[in-house]
Amino acid sequence: MSAAAQREHTVLFTDGAASGNPGPGGWAVVAVTPDDRVIELGGGEPHTTNNRMELTAAIKGLQHLATDPAAVTIYTDSSYVLKGITQWVWSWQRRGWKTADGGDVLNRDLWETLLALVQTRGRGRIAWEWVRGHDGTAGNERVDEIAVAFSRGRSETLFDGPLTDYSRAVLDLPDPPQPNHSSRDVVGRSDGSVTRPPAAVAKKTPPYSYLSVIDGVLERHATWTECERRVKGRAGARFRKALSAADEASILRGWGFEAP
């Protein structure tokens, strides 16, 4: 997805970390709202597990958006969270929060909280997408940084402001899967079925170019590293990824520049 104007939903990245597992932990959220505002959230606990922090991140993100009616797409690198909320939770609930072998479901308190948030938001209002961790997806890399920092007791400055002032290509997302392999609209089904396992992540479309504008001066970049180097820390900077020559021309026209 390259054009914010095409989004009618909030993009949410979540992650959790624990040093020692169990040990000191941290959770993190990066949200991008339809009006192009980026909000970073994060926190920590003195003694916890990685799985609890992963769940806490998803909970905190949805709680922050409780009064926002927009649909939400949540990107997580946790198979535990994605499979749990789209498959396992329904069986656990039917069995009185017992596993298939009769044991107690771990982290039941958090699963119940997350399930309530999902059900309150309504069927089809949350899409869950798995993204490979440490694979260059900017939003996922950032939530990992925040979660790890909190797990290690480090202070972290959390961003809250316009997307144009954000120094990371947070909307440079993996391409959506084909319709018959999507996890969208799975949450809310009583049978807990899922049509796309988290192991099957879509490949990114190679970018055609990256564009940036600072003080009315346009530059074209071959890589995000070059673009980021120019726009990072520059208030009012504009930047976008183009997926094709036609996409680049459309972006340039939208910015008031003559397309080549």
Image (cartoon, rainbow, N blue to C red):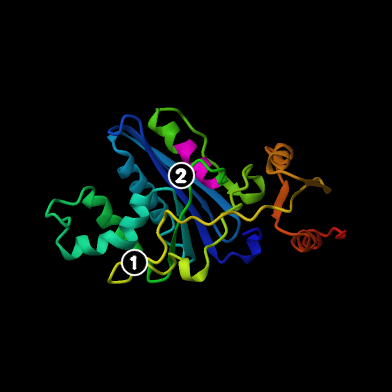
The image shows residue 207 at horizontal and vertical percentages of 69, 52
What's the residue type where badge 2 is placed?
Leu
| Mark found first going from the N terminus, 1 or 2 | 2
x%, y% of residue 239?
71, 50
Per the rendered image, the range of residues in magenta is 139-146
Is residue 43 visible in the rendered structure shown here? yes
User: Could you tell whether 227 is left or right of 71 in the image?
Assistant: right
> Which type of secondary structure does the marked residue at label 2 adopt?
strand
* Residue at 49% in and 66% down: 70
Question: Residue 206 at what x, y percent from top left?
Answer: 66, 53
Determine the main secondary structure of the stretch shown in magenta: helix
Q: Quadrant of the C terminus?
A: bottom right
Label drawn at residue 120: 1
User: Going 85% across and 58% down the picture, which residue do you hit?
Assistant: 257
Q: Is residue 140 magenta?
A: yes
Is 33 contained in the magenta span?
Answer: no
Q: Residue at x 13, y 51 (%)?
A: 103
Query: Which residue lies at the image location 26% right of the left edge and 60% below the top edge?
Result: 89
Furthest residue in direction left, as rendered = 102
Quadrant of the rendering where the N terminus is positioned: bottom right
Placement of 43 over or under 56, stated as above or below: above
How far across and down, in percent of the image, does residue 161 sit?
59, 47
Q: Which residue is mark 2?
A: 41
Residue 1: numbered disc: none
Q: Label 1 amino acid?
A: Thr
Q: CA distance from mark 1 to mark 2?
A: 22 Å
